């Protein structure tokens, strides 16, 4: 929310919101949030204001009929993790430590990229209007 103080919303099942606040109108500050399909549901029903926040979505499961985030952005993670998971079948392959290190490096690279996207480097510059 763009007003002070900042209010942290509690995540609850959507059924709780509809049970506790059946009237979907009003002018209250939300206390709870849930998701129904692709929409967020707030309880109590919010007044007219702009809300800002961060939402972390879980990755979709891997499916063969479409490409996923991993296939497009991190195929090496899939490759090395698959090779490590095959260990019971390939037994004592001397390349396992190499694959483990390559997997760790690939995951670290993704974390570093995400961190640099979240916290950009560089100096802030003030503009005089």
Image (cartoon, rainbow, N blue to C red):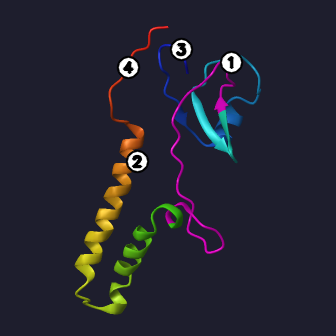
In the picture, residue 21 is in which quadrant? top right
The residue identified by callout 4 is: 125
Give the residue at x 55% y 18%.
2
Of circles 3 and 1, which is in front? 3
Q: Magenta includes 62? A: yes
| Element carrying mark 2 | helix
Q: Regarding mark 4 in the picture, which secondary structure is present there?
A: loop
State how far apart marks 4 and 2 are (Cα). 23 Å
Q: Which residues are magenta?
A: 42-70
User: Is 52 included in the stretch rendered in magenta?
Assistant: yes
Q: CA distance from mark 2 to mark 1?
A: 34 Å
Q: Residue 54 location in percent, x, y?
A: 51, 36
Relative to 2, residue 67 above or below: below
How far apart, in angstroms, are the residues tagged by discs 3 and 2?
A: 28 Å
Q: Nearer the viewer, residue 113 or 48?
A: 113
Residue at the location (63% across, 21% down)? Answer: 50
Give the mark, 2 or 1, whose residue is nearer the N terminus: 1
| Left or right: where 29 falls relative to 24 | left
Residue that label 3 marks: 3
Q: Which residue is mark 2?
A: 114
Tag 3's secondary structure?
loop
State which mark lies toward you, 3 or 4.
Answer: 4
- Give x and y (percent) for residue 97: 23, 77
Kindly report the secondary structure that dominates the magenta region of the rendered protein: loop
The tag earlier along the polypeptide, 4 or 2, is 2
Q: Residues within 10 Å of mark 1 (few under 14, many from 20)?
A: few
- Image position, residue 79 (x, y; %): 42, 75
Q: Are marks 2 and 1 in contact (CB under 8 Å)?
A: no
Mark nearest the camera among 2 and 1 is: 2
Near mark 2 (Cα within 10 A), the count class, few <14, some 14-19 or many ≥20, is few
């Amino acid at each position: 929310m763009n007003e002070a103080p900042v209010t942290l919303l509690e995540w609850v099942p959507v059924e709780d919101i509809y049970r506790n606040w059946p009237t979907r109108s009003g002018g209250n500050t939300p206390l709870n949030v849930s998701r129904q399909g692709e929409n967020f549901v707030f309880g109590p029903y919010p007044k007219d204001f702009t809300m800002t926040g961060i939402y972390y979505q879980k990755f979709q499961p891997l499916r063969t009929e479409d490409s996923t985030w991993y296939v497009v952005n991190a195929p090496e993670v899939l490759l090395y993790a698959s090779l490590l998971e095959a260990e019971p079948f390939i037994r004592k392959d001397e390349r396992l430590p190499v694959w483990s290190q390559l997997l760790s490096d690939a995951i670290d690279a993704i974390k570093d990229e995400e961190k640099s996207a979240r916290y950009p480097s560089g100096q802030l510059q003030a503009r005089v209007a």
